[in-house]
Amino acid sequence: MPIKFMTRQLPSLRSRLLLAATVWLVAITLAAGYLVPSFIKSYLIDQEAQQLALYVDELTARVEFNPNGRITLPERLSNPRFRSPYSGLYWTVIVNDNQFRSRSLWDARITGDKASGYTGPKQQSLLVVQRTILLPESDAPVTLMVASDQAKLNATLQQLTQGLWLILLIMAAGILLLIWLQISWSLLPLRTLQQSLKQVRDGQATELAGVYPLEVKPVIDDLNALLFHYQELLERARNHAGNLSHALKTPIAILNNEVTNLEPQDRQKLSPALTQLQQHIDYHLGRARMAGAANILAARTLASPRVDAIAMAMDKVYAVRGVTLVNELDSELSVAVETRDLDEMVGNLIENSYKWANQLIRVHQTEQDQHTVKISIEDDGPGMASQNYAAVLQRGVKLDETTPGSGLGLSIVNELAHSYRGKLTLTHSSLGGIKAVLELPRPRSKA
């Protein structure tokens, strides 16, 4: 099963850390911006209420009844605002339905109650402290009320709130800048790692270089060990494959020559065995070539020029067939495959098309996304039954024994594509023959 590339793009570590810090900082700032003013307002109201309570005490000490049974205030209260009309500081004394009020109320009254709030002259919102007392001269309770206009208190609170929000915003911006600097400094080793990986991917280095923190260094050491092991293993496998190829080529040639000198019945017995031996050698040598590139991360090949080069070679080999290949690939289309491996895959598919096509072979890209590209090679040949599409991708399977070949080409292409996280799919072509769709990875961006 081919390995699929993940298409979901997660945000970077920097973005995630900054987002988390910003969300938390905004939450804290909003909480402080709404809670602190409420605390300040409660404090200011308490302070104002305590001052009004002192005026109530002063009013209690000075209120009395005259011989006619009317409420009098022989001495004025100490604050001159009680004598200035609509000054914002008022008192009133209520006995039954009668009211005796300060000059600052002028001709107005304090209306409302504790539940709905009190209002004074010119619909001023008032903060009221009241007390009910009993005087010896009257059987009716006496209600004393001292009130102040809340407009000044609200204006003071608004100024404090604006100053607080300004301080909070400056502090939040400073903290966010500090967090950004801290994150940038903390992620600096990862940026160094990214640059080192880019050098490895571009073929400029064979290992990850740089000095890294203790938390990252074990991972870097393991990656370097893995890269070294991969390169050594790959080189060793290809050397063994080359040695095996040279070691077996001469003995098999000698055996084939000797078989031709045998009697026909003996030749019929030995020829299939030698052919099968040659097929196994070709297959496993092909597998060895599939081990990958020595610098797999830097693999990048332009597909269209390779198709043109292969088509020129095939035009000479199959000139008598009069087949025309139309290359519709974008000249800038590149795949993350080593050049010789791409030649191996595309060459096998194009050669099969040359063998079976009547007149036309079409090479084009059918679909591509950010990570993969699909190259289609289709012909106008006789095609095959759909139930045989999967079978011909297996090793050594040939549907037509009369055509030359070992039956290993499509199998090698399939496994080679798989080694690059791609796949080979055979379907019916709109031209009438077979459509081979080769899905390969796109090179990673250098950005």
Image: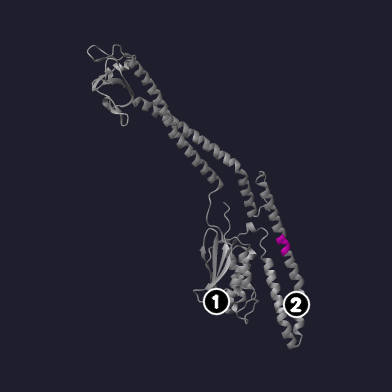
Please give left or right for residue 225 compared with residue 83 in the image: right
In the picture shown, does residue 280 fall above or below 99? below
Q: Position of residue 351 (x, y in %)?
A: 60, 73
Question: Image point 75% across, 86% down: which residue?
Answer: 266
Left or right of 53 in this view: 324: right
The range drawn in magenta is 233-237
**Quarter placement of the N terminus:** bottom right
Image side of residue 200 versus residue 77, left or right = right
Residue 301 disc label: none
Residue type, mark 2 in image: Ala
- Identify the element where label 1 is drawn: helix
The CA distance from mark 1 to mark 2 is 37 Å
Q: Residue tagged by mark 1?
A: 387
Question: How far across and down, in percent of the image, does residue 25 sit?
Answer: 50, 38
Image point 72% across, 60% down: which residue?
A: 233
Res. 306 image quadrant: bottom right
Q: Name above or below for residue 366 compared with residue 101.
A: below
